[in-house]
Image: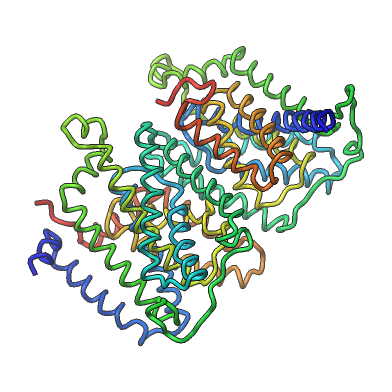
Amino acid sequence: MSFIRRLAGNAPPRILWSLGVLLALLLLAPALLGKYWLSVLILILYFAYVGQAWNVLMGFAGQLSLGHALYAGLGGYIAAGLYFHYGIGPWAGLFAAVAVAGMAGAIVGYLGFRFSLAGVYFALLTIAFAEFTRVAFDHWEWAGGSGGLFLKVEHATDIVNLRGGPVLFYYSILALAAGAFILCRALLQSRLGQYWLAIREDAEAAQAVGVPVLRCKMIAIVISAALTALAGVWNAFYYNNLFPETAFAMGRSIEITLAPIIGGLGTLFGPIVGAVVLTGLGEAFTDLGDVLRIPGTKQIFYGLALLVIVVYRPAGVWPWLADKLGLKERRP
Amino acid sequence: MTADFLLTLAQAIVNGLLTGMVYGLMALGLSVIFGVMRIVNFAHGEMMVVGMYLAWMGFEYLQVSPMLSLPVIAAIFFAAGYVLQRGLISPFIGRPEHQQFLLLLAVAILLVNASLAIAGPDSRGVQMESQFDSYELGPLVFDAVRLHAALAAVAIALLLWLFFTRTRTGKSIRAAADNNLAALVVGLDVRRLYAVTFGVGAACVGAAGALMITIIPVSPFLAVEYTLLAFVIVIVGGLGSMTGALLGGLLIGVSEAVAGLLLQPSLKSMFSFGLLILVLLLRPQGLLGKGPQ
């Protein structure tokens, strides 16, 4: 219990109660919701999870990555490839996926941080690695090349191989999202988390007071890449197909960054709130687009919504919402 | 085989150089905007595609050749860029990078999908008679459209150079880029100068779009590719350096053409991104840049 008490820390009781109720509702959701709403909820949880993973690097440690599709794509391809070729299930495969993506993160991070690339320059380096890998996978036969890699669709629930219907994937992504939330809270409370925030605010000052800047940034990118790889594994088994054109696409990387930026960078609830807002808007605009029957209208409304949010709430929706709801954490 | 091969290679290099000039003009817009106000225009490829569409529309509906509609398109882009900077981007100067990124991403989404809604997803090209013309220099063949596009790109780059070195506004912009505070102190209207800069950058990419449509057809899906291409070019040449952008354009144009000849065409972008990674690590200020700040 002391672990939970420590995690709760100075959070207001109201927020803890709300979290408890939310978790209970989420656990019951498959019994309460129809097929469509469950699929929307799955999407929300996926973006909340992968946003949380990206947030570790950008929100906590302040390093802008626009190439996170690299880690999701590697994770997905490795777990799916092992299953496809050798019948190795994803529970074993995810260790390989996490290891490889973590290594990739370490390489990108070491090169970027060692050569002191910051801001836009680091972001471009991450894009370059993702694009480079995309073209490489286009030509890699083992991974199916540009024709893609397909997993057989099975409806019988088989937890060992992560095969089954929406409910299985719902609970697995819920577990990931909840786990990432708790992990990030614990990280933020740790010494490492404080070091990250110091680096984010002023890397030179942090270095001057003895924060091991390079090591902390490396840990951030490896954790972030490893968590993102898990999302990639889940994604591959949920959708049953992988193409280099989508798995490593710039669009995929951007998608990962949106929920935390819109929700509130560096906050624990930001990625969750952002995922709800963006997925909600996306679904609403899809319906609207279907009514209007003009290509691109969904995306036009989506772009307008992003524009409005970034102009009026540049720090994200959650900090403003938390203030309105009186949910600000007390400072010790 | 060697003589034949060398000739093919030389021909590929010629084509790469000509296309590279247009790439350079496109990247010049990105570089000017970044060099002056430290904003990375993530909507650059989308602007390029809109420029290509405008030129296509002028040709398709008004029967105006892209070369003639180019000044009009550049003027429209200048005005749109000016207004965009004044109304939307100005408050974001100096803000954290991820906020600038999100703002321009939203602009990019709007531009590319407006193109999609208006012109549809099919690729659109112009069919001109001059597309079959060519000039010959010894054994080398210069496609007329490519040569004209490259010459126009050089001319525009020269105009831009004159603007930045000879006119009062151009010099003021360079002053504001060098030292924002000092420019304010001596009474320059930096806000207006920034808007002009964004307009000039937009006009470059609009003009590059009008030239590019004579070489290859346009589709909305090219936008992301062009954005990435422009990034690669300016980083290789030096972000913020004008000659660097042109040199980078030539380099990437040639390397694409040669890689397309020697390797599978689909591998050619791997070469560009490999080059980008190397330059970022070994010389992040680019070949001709002054260094990141």
Coordinates of residue A15 in the picture (x, y in percent): 19, 66
**Residue at x-position 47% and y-position 32%:** B280
| Residue in view at x 21 percent, y 34 percent | A206
**Is B153 above or below relative to A44?**
above
Q: Quadrant of the C terminus of chain B?
A: top left
Residue nearer the viewer, B192 or A59: A59
- Which color scheme did the rendering employ for the protein? rainbow
Q: Can the viewer see residue A65 in this picture?
A: yes
Q: Is residue A170 above or below residue B116?
A: below
Position of A237 relative to B152 (above/below):
below
How far across and down, in percent of the image, does residue B206 sit? 67, 36
Q: Which of B273 and A171 lies nearest the eye of the viewer? A: B273
Relative to B160, say whether A296 is above or below. Answer: below
Image coordinates for residue A10, horizontal then vertical, percent? 11, 58
* Residue A258 placement, left or right of A211: right
Q: Nearer the viewer, residue A113 or B22?
A: A113
